[in-house]
Image (cartoon, rainbow, N blue to C red):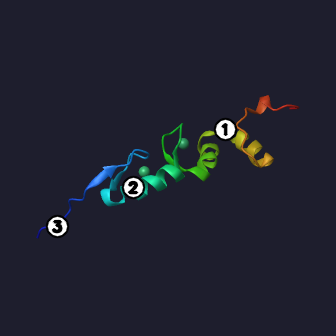
Amino acid sequence: MDMVSEETTSICNHCDRAIPSVNIDLHYAHCSRNLEKCKVCGDMIPRKHAEEHYLNTHAPPELAVIVKTLGSILILPVNSLPGM
Ligand SMILES: [Zn+2]
Ligand SMILES: [Zn+2]
């Protein structure tokens, strides 16, 4: 039995994954528009979840609480907030 296991793949410049060559253009367009690399852990994160990922994964808990309270993303150390 000859299995055709040889699939031509290209490496996506954005996420470094091997993508079937037939899909690479589409993938890259989607990938570069929607994914961004986490500066801390290097994971590919959907752009709209990048801040959430940062807060959930890398930010200290007290920081995340502050951000949720304010309802917007402010990467600030606790003691640098005015009036605290
Ligand atoms: Zn990609
Ligand atoms: Zn990360």
Say which mark, if any, is on residue 24: none
Residues at circles 2 and 3 in contact by the CB criterion of under 8 Å: no
How far across and down, in percent of the image, does residue 24 sit?
A: 37, 55
Q: Name the residue under label 2.
A: 25
Q: Name the residue under label 3.
A: 3
**Residue 42 in the image: above or below residue 6:** above
Q: In which quarter of the image is residue 81?
A: top right
- Which is nearer the N-term, disc 3 or disc 1? 3
At x 69% / y 41%, what residue is drawn?
61
Q: Name the residue under label 1.
A: 60
Q: Which amino acid, by three-letter code, is at mark 1?
A: Pro
How crowded pointer 3 is (Cα within 10 Å; few <14, some 14-19, many 20+) is rated as: few
Q: Which amino acid, by three-letter code, is at mark 3?
A: Met
Query: Which quadrant of the figure contains the N terminus?
Result: bottom left
At x 35% / y 55%, what residue is drawn?
19
Query: Which quadrant of the figure contains the C terminus?
Result: top right
Residues at circles 3 and 1 in contact by the CB criterion of under 8 Å: no
Cβ of disc 1 within 8 Å of ligand 2? no
